[in-house]
Image (cartoon, grey):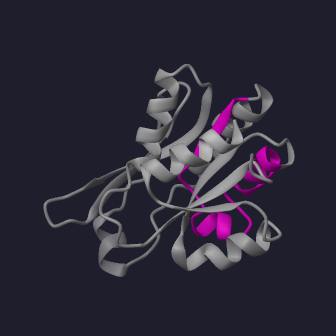
């Protein structure tokens, strides 16, 4: 058994395959584990540029369009995050905490959360309630994550096998 029930799944910015969290959540749901939270579904155009990001609720499958960059956003390199849609996605985390999910998976310690906004309140509510949480954290933000969590929690490679080993240790 680990000392804490939460872990950061650390990834590099250029990680090609970021579907390990979604696959992990799917594996556990097939085993009857009540998994709540959100993963991102990112679509890219022929040139490799991101064309959209949807947050997908793990318990319902509902998709929330959080990012639809316009040509202007791309040309000016400006943020195209729909903060209203991001706020809407908080309900999936609140529901997971309220219903005491067996596990919360979250593919999001992004720019908003790094500023203490976005899904931050819901992330720390899950930790405070001692509900197991696995969260994707970009490598460049790992020090900030550790600071915010008081140096607690596990740090994992962004790897399906590492996720399963961690889950076996906390359940």
| Residue 120 belongs to the span the image colors magenta | yes
The residue lying furthest to the left in this view is 46
- Residue found 59% across the figure and 43% down from its top: 105
In this image, 105 relative to 170: left or right?
A: left
Q: Image quadrant of residue 16?
A: bottom left
Residue 6 appears in view: yes
Asked whether, in this view, residue 72 is left or right of residue 24, the answer is left
In which quadrant is the C terminus drawn? Answer: top right
2 left or right of 103 in image: right
Instruction: Name the side, left or right, on which 149 lies relative to 51.
Output: right
Q: Is residue 115 visible?
A: no
Instruction: Name the spot of residue 55 as percent of width and height, x first.
Output: 48, 44
Residue at 47%, 70% (x, y): give it.
Answer: 79
From this view, report whether residue 117 is shown above or below residue 22: below
Between residues 76 and 24, which one lies in front from this camera angle? 24
Residue situated in front as seen by the camera: 12 or 88: 12
Task: Note whether 99 is above or below 77 in the view shown.
Answer: above
Q: Quadrant of residue 115?
A: bottom right
Locate residue 26, reporting x and y percent: 45, 32
- Quarter of the rendering occupied by the N terminus: top right
Q: Is residue 153 magenta?
A: no
* Residue 148, image x, y percentages: 78, 69
Q: Residue at x 75, y 51 (%)?
A: 2
Residue 156 occupies quadrant? bottom right
Tell me which segment is drawn in magenta. Answer: 101-127
Q: Residue furthest top?
A: 32
**Residue 28 position within the rendered picture, expressed as x and y whole percent measured from the top left:** 51, 30
Please tell me which residue is depicted at 60% across the width and 75% down the height of the picture.
141
Q: How many numbered marks, from 0 up?
A: 0
């Amino acid at each position: 058994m680990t000392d804490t029930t939460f872990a950061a799944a650390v990834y590099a910015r250029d990680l090609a395959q970021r579907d390990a969290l979604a696959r992990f959540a799917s594996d556990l749901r097939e085993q009857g584990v009540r998994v709540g939270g959100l993963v991102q579904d990112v679509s890219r155009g022929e040139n490799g540029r991101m064309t959209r990001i949807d947050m997908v609720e793990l318990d319902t499958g509902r998709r929330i369009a959080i990012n639809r960059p316009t040509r202007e956003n791309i040309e000016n390199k400006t943020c195209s995050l729909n903060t209203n849609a991001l706020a809407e996605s908080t309900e999936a985390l609140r529901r997971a905490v309220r219903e005491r999910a067996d596990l919360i998976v979250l593919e999001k310690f992004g720019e908003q959360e790094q500023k203490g906004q976005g899904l931050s309140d819901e992330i720390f509510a899950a930790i405070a309630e001692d509900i197991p949480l696995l969260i994707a954290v970009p490598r460049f933000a790992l020090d900030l994550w550790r600071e915010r969590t008081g140096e607690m929690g596990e740090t994992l490679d962004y790897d399906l096998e590492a996720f399963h080993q961690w889950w076996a240790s906390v359940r």
